[in-house]
Image (tube, rainbow, N blue to C red):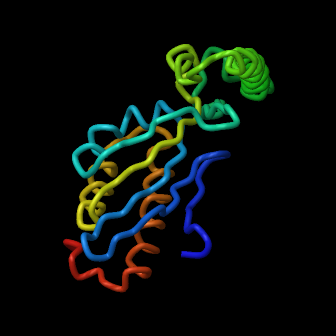
Amino acid sequence: MSDPIDSKFFEHGRVTIGLVDDVSQLASLEIVMPYCLLQTITPQLLSAGVIDELRLNDPIAVWFPSLSNNRLSPLVSRVPDLDRQLNEALTQEITRVIKIFSTVNQYLIDPTDISPMLPLGVYVKYTYRCRFDKMLSLLEGINSIKVVGVGEFQVALASVLSELCHMTGDITSLPL
């Protein structure tokens, strides 16, 4: 493969095809996503493949859903620009925390030591290995999860699966 085939989601999230073995029908995907979403879909991922080489993404960044008036209590939803003010305050605070951890990260032997202290939306990078024929069941399993952000990952994964099918030229083994 000359150029990596990938599908992006959110600011830093992506699913990239790594290695592909047509004979064994195994694929290796490089995935970058918020840690909280990885924790949400881990059972589905492990039912279809293996998660390997989990590490913090570089540069350290954090994803969080923006607040809107429809997510605020009716008691305060009428305050003008409250959603914008809250989103700005959250962004400033998360930026401050990330700067602190980026500084601390320079002094650590293993940067993953700070993972439990970072916000849950911190981006992580990992390698995911699975058989082609397990990917559709993985997509189906993820489809049942109704958590903000999971749908965007599912679309990125489906896009990469489509490209994988075109690359290998054989989708007959996929249970349609």
Q: Is residue 129 above or below residue 69?
A: below
* Quadrant position of residue 24: bottom left
Where residue 73 appears, as percent x and y from the top left, is 58, 19
Depth check: 65 or 23 in front?
23
Give the residue drawn at x 24%, y 73%: 174
Where residue 107 appears, as percent x and y from the top left, is 69, 15
Residue 107 placement, left or right of 14? right
Residue furthest bottom as drawn: 169
Depth check: 86 or 43 in front?
43
Where residue 33 appears, as percent x and y from the top left, is 53, 42
If the image is split into quadrants, where does the C terminus sit? bottom left
Residue furthest front as drawn: 109
Give the residue drawn at x 43%, y 54%: 154
Total labels: the figure holds 0
Q: Is residue 22 above or below residue 90?
A: below
Where residue 168 appears, as percent x and y from the top left, is 37, 80
Give the residue drawn at x 72%, y 22%: 102
Give the residue drawn at x 54%, y 45%: 32
Residue 119 placement, left or right of 60? left
Depth check: 143 or 127 in front?
127
* Quadrant position of residue 20: bottom left
Residue 112 placement, left or right of 23? right
Question: Do we see residue 86 in this rendering?
Answer: no
* Quadrant position of residue 79: top right
Question: Do we see residue 172 in this rendering?
Answer: yes
